Each structure stands twice: as structure tokens, then as C-alpha cells.
Image (cartoon, helix red, strand yellow):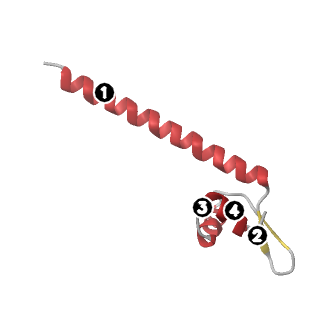
Amino acid sequence: MPLADVAETLSISAAQAYALVRRGDLRAIQVGGRGQWRVEVSELEAYIDRLYAETDKQSRQQQELEQQSAGVEQQP
């Protein structure tokens, strides 16, 4: 899948998609004489799964913090 399609799938710019590849966040390969980047669908799906996992973790941490501060406020 070309980076332009990755960008469209993620609703980001082509430059942002390229940055994901450069940083190593999204695995890709360079193919052809012009060195165009391609991303396997399975790699894109794995990247999206990692984002969901990170979001779930952050959400749980935020909920724990809110519960802790609610407990502190309720104590006399």
C-alpha cells in the first residue's frame, strides 16, 4: 500500500505518514527505481492495534487518577 493510501486511511497528511515511517513507528519498505515507500496492510493494522492498546492504557490510567483524587476529596 503506498504511503498516500496509508495517509488517507489514517486521515493524516502524506508528510505525517512519511514521518511515522522515518521514526520507525510504522514499518515500511522502499521499492522500485524511484524508491517509493510501501506498507503492508498487516503492518498498518498492527500499528493501529498498538495505538488502540496505548489509548486503552492511557484511559485506564486517567480513570485510576480520577478515582484516586475523588477518594482523597471525600475523606474528612
Disc 4 residue type? Val
The quarter of the image holding the N terminus is: bottom right
Q: Position of residue 52 (x, y in %)?
A: 58, 42
Outermost top residue: 76
Quadrant for residue 40, please give it. Answer: bottom right
Reading the image, the residue beneath label 2 is 37
* N-term mark: 3 or 2: 3
Q: Earlier in the sequence, mark 4 or mark 2?
A: 4
**Rendered position, 76 above or below 58:** above
Quadrant where the image shows the C terminus: top left
Mark 4 touches mark 2? (CB < 8 Å):
no
Circle 1 residue: 68
Q: Residue at x 19, y 26 (%)?
A: 73
Q: Which mark is residue 11?
A: 3
With 72 as the anchor, is 65 left or right in this view? Answer: right
Query: Label 3's element?
Result: loop
Q: Nearer the viewer, residue 41 or 21?
A: 41
Q: Is residue 62 above or below residue 74?
A: below
- Give neighbour class at mark 1: few <14, some 14-19, many 20+ (Cα, 10 Å): few
Q: Residues within 10 Å of mark 2 (few under 14, many from 20)?
A: some
Q: On residue 6, which mark appears?
A: 4
